[in-house]
Image (cartoon, coloured by chain):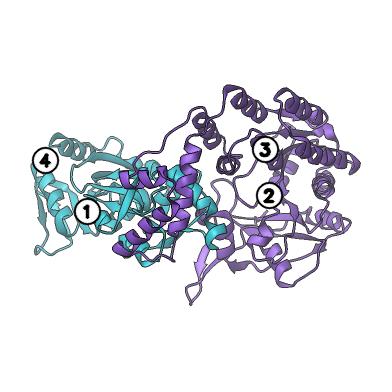
Chain colours: A purple, B cyan
Amino acid sequence: MPLTDMPDFAGIILDDFATRNATRVDTPVILAAEPFLDMAGEDLRRRIFLTENERGESLCLRPEFTIPVCLRHIETATGTPKRYSYLGQVFRQRREGANEFYQAGIEDLGERDAASADARIVADALGCLQKVLPDKAFAVTIGDQAVFEAVVAALGLPAGWQRRLVRAFGQTDLLEAMIARLAKAQPVGGLSPEVELLLDTGDEAGLVTHLTNEMDRTGYLTNASRSPEEIVRRLKEKRLLAGVSLDATKLDALKEFLSINVSLRYAPGVLADFAKSANLPLEKAIEGFDARVAALGKAGASLADITWRAAFGRPLDYYTGLVFEITVRGGHDVLVGGGRYDRMLTLLGAKDHIPAVGFSMWLDRIERSLEVTR
Amino acid sequence: MSITIGLPSKGRMKDDASAIFERAGMKIVAVGNDRSYRGRVEGFDDVEIAFLSASEISREIGNGTVDFGVTGEDLVREGLAEADKRVEIAARLGFGHADVIVAVPDIWLDVETMADLGDVAAEFRARHGRRLAIATKYWRLTQQHFSSQHGIQLYRIVESLGATEGAPAAGQADIIVDITTTGSTLKANHLKVLSDGVILRSEACLVRARKPEHEGNPTVARIIKAVRSVL
């Protein structure tokens, strides 16, 4: 079968989406590349198909749907809450698999009740998948950045360290390196005696003047990049952060938390026990977590099929809470990926804060699972 | 089968490469006049020389249109995806030294390491309404170093094809990824290299395209042996 053909089961997905209170939308295939690179970073560049128009603007073949669906929502000034669905081709450079394939998904924008929106999106993804692959059992893995943020905050680390750790959430190597660093304070070196003196005496204005003079002398524009004030502020913060270390008990608590990997049936109990034994005030995060578990139960998802892996997260700054993946039980291919991206719409230019959660199904991988069944 | 070696067509690189081959007993002579872009090697009837620009050499080795080439490792690693699968560095030639480095303005007193830069990049958008901008011609090396090695995703590359070291002062970018040999150009432009900001220590290399037909080819083995023997 030619790869460009829409999978046979696309109709099943569309019929299913129609019952899930979502407006079907389509987007152009050729899109401005800027928002994708801005959101996902330069690393995306080698994974998408880029071209230029005559005016030198970067264009790309649609690499995914979430960003264009959100942009469309902002441009058309549609009110919230609003749920969108899509099904169409996406284009990516991949080591394995075809470069053009289909994705389908739902984006839920503006629902203020995060727990039930999260639960509904997971239940939608599972429910749809069950219609396409009725003979399969599935495994859902979820992660929650909000809980990690709460743990890091409860450890009493300064804000700068909290931001660092949260930024590394989901990147095991980076996070481990940071945790290793937290075991021991590391003084800042390499500063001139003049700067050291200004820092020691707390002479912030003196430091700013020093930097402004340096920029004047060396011909740097003071408004083009980081300002003297910004550099001084971070230099002070860096000195503060460099002196920070965590005692062994707290380090162990952090490591213990990250090693949690438990069925969602037991997750609320495990999280509560962790908070108690580590003596960390996590009430609010636990409340949010438990509310989602309860909502998942109410939405009809089988908690036995869902695993909470505390270290599971994605390293992009627009993800804020839930992330999840669905595989066939015992399989490795991620058939559905999803999560909460509350920061994305503001980053894309929305004036109001619009909470958002969604998922995307990989139709090529689903097709492969189907072929295995046959 | 004849073996083609791509050599730099002009400048120091051409002279240094020719000198090494001559010491290795492979005197290179131009075919026709001395501005010709073809050459041959005395005593090696089955070897041809193609004089090419340095960046073309890495591309031609990647394509396998030449069997060997003399070019900078930086151009090989920048020009080719999965370079180690496609080419072999048969010998490091000891000239054309240049480091590919990450440099930031001297006045960024708070930035000494890539980790510092990670902190700055993460907050850049919130403070400046845009991502941290890096001026470079080394797209691939920059992405590998920032994204894969240091987990820094949030930055933008501003392509710079010349005078990259001037970009921060001129406000075109915040920092640079560029090559440096002595560091004097960086110094003159009030830039400093991060302590873990050396992406690659590059030099001119004899690079071989990984081709199955090289297996057991006596000329291929002879060329590598000859060049290695004089290093």
Q: Mark 2 sits on what residue?
A: A364
Assess disc 2: are there few (<14), some (14-19) or many (≥20) residues with their C-alpha within 10 Å of its C-alpha: some
Residue B204 appears in view: yes
* Camera-side residue of B110 and B91: B110
**Disc 3 residue type (three-letter):** Phe
Residue sitting at x 60%, y 68%:
A30
**Disc 4 residue type (three-letter):** Ala
Q: Mark 4 sits on what residue?
A: B24
Q: Mark 3 sits on what residue?
A: A148
Q: Secondary structure at mark 4?
A: loop
Tags 1 and 2 both on a single chain: no
In this rendering, the label closer to the viewer, 3 or 2: 3
Is the residue under label 4 in contact with that under label 2 (CB below 8 Å)?
Answer: no
Q: Is residue B203 left or right of residue B45?
A: right
Q: Secondary structure at mark 2?
A: helix
Q: Mark 1 sits on what residue?
A: B184
